[in-house]
Image (tube, rainbow, N blue to C red):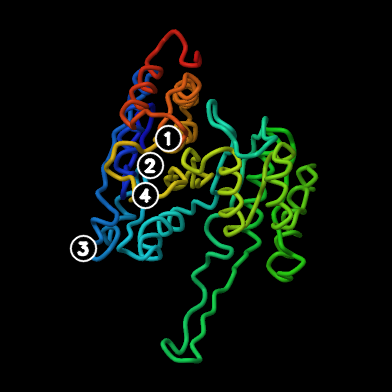
């Protein structure tokens, strides 16, 4: 890892609009870095679906080794219509998460300025989803039998370890204590009687030891609560599958999955963490210059926060929020700005010493 105020960040722009929103993020990060007195060396990796078409794999054989000495990874989007999703996901994103023990998937959700929620009463919606990121329902334990025969079967095991549940619960408790002190745990222990009961027990143990009460909710009831009473939620801790689903629902309730960020974090910082927007590669609009870069910008701000560059993170966040508040929006948010126009509006605010927070 690098020392001081200089960082090495690996850039995987990936596929589709990832190429377009990534350039928006890196130029804005460079601007705040110059304003705040640090620097970033970007290491571009041409990995993704194009790489797969040429080499039969999503990244080089030694790809993980190439990333290991970096300070962070900034990912754009992965996926292409002509390549199965399991190939693109398990060939790039999931190996990075697991090799570098990025066991926290952190997804903040709030309504940004100028973004309208589809809910009638969502003012004040502001929550954080803490998703377990390396085990649970997304384990590799299982397999297929009798392929192609009438009796074909598939088995997929959900794997929950005490260590895995303890560390994600501890991270969620810390988040809750730093916010409003409200912790909700997503479960389905009325029907999934082994793994989810274990999850409930361990999360409750961790919360009680920290002096925090945990609100246990069945995932179906929690989904309804996100829609009906979103302001009652603060920090949600969830398993891999439940966290994946509930965070997308919450982002939609806040107005758009297209602006949502995600951080894959290795809390001890023994390995680099990875930051990405929640949206996909959107091949239907790729190359048209109309992609919304907010999710990538917000993910980049989370990266800066993780690196300890709080001033830079705040400046970048204030810049894209100010641009949105001023009415500069891409088409998906009801505006007419192109990706380049929105980026220029953010860039101007990143370097505005009079205060990027002014709308």
Q: Nearer the viewer, residue 153 or 141?
A: 153
Regarding mark 2 in the picture, which secondary structure is present there? Answer: strand
Q: Nearer the viewer, residue 184 or 103?
A: 184
Front tag of 4 and 3 = 4
Q: Which residue is mark 1?
A: 300
Q: CA distance from mark 3 to mark 2?
A: 22 Å
Q: Which residue is mark 3?
A: 55
Regarding mark 1 in the picture, which secondary structure is present there? Answer: helix
Instruction: Work out which quarter of the rendered image holds the N terminus and state it.
Output: top left
Q: Residue furthest left?
A: 54
Q: In the image, is 267 to the left or to the right of 146?
A: right
Q: CA distance from mark 4 to mark 2?
A: 15 Å
Q: In the image, is 353 to the left or to the right of 48?
A: right
Q: Earlier in the sequence, mark 4 or mark 3?
A: 3
Q: CA distance from mark 3 to mark 1?
A: 29 Å
Marks 4,3: beta carbons within 8 A: no
Q: Which mark is residue 74?
A: 2
Q: Which residue is mark 4?
A: 281
> Which residue is pictured at 67% across the width and 30% down the height?
123
């Amino acid at each position: 890892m690098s020392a001081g105020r200089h960082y090495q960040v690996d850039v995987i722009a990936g596929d589709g609009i990832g190429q377009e929103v990534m350039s928006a993020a890196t130029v804005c990060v460079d601007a705040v870095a110059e304003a705040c007195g640090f620097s970033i060396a970007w290491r571009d990796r041409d990995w993704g679906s194009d790489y797969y078409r040429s080499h039969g794999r999503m990244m080089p054989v030694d790809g993980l080794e190439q990333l290991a000495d970096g300070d962070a990874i900034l990912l754009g989007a992965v996926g292409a219509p002509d390549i199965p999703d399991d190939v693109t996901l398990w060939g790039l994103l999931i190996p990075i998460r697991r090799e570098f023990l990025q066991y926290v998937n952190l997804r903040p959700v709030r309504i940004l300025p100028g973004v309208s929620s589809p809910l009638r009463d969502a003012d004040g919606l502001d929550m954080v989803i803490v998703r377990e990121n390396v085990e649970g329902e997304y384990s590799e334990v299982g397999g297929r039998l009798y392929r192609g025969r009438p009796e074909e079967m598939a088995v997929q095991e959900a794997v929950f370890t005490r260590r895995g549940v303890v560390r994600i619960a501890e991270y969620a408790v810390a988040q809750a204590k730093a916010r409003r002190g409200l912790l909700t745990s997503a479960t389905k222990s009325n029907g999934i009687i082994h793994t989810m009961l274990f999850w409930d027990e361990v999360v409750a143990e961790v919360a009680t030891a920290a002096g925090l009460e945990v609100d246990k909710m069945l995932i179906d009831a929690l989904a309804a609560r996100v829609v009906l009473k979103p302001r009652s939620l603060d920090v949600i801790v969830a398993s891999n599958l439940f966290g994946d689903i509930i965070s997308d629902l919450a982002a939609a309730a806040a107005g758009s999955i297209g602006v949502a960020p995600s951080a894959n974090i290795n809390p001890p910082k023994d390995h680099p963490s990875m930051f990405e927007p929640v949206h996909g590669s959107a091949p239907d609009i790729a190359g048209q210059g109309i992609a919304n870069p907010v999710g990538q910008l917000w993910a980049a701000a989370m990266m800066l926060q993780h690196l300890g560059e709080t001033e830079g993170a705040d400046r970048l966040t204030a810049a894209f929020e100010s641009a949105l508040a001023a009415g500069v929006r891409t088409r998906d948010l009801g505006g007419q700005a192109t990706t380049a126009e929105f980026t220029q509006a953010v860039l101007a605010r990143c370097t505005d010493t009079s205060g990027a927070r002014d709308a």
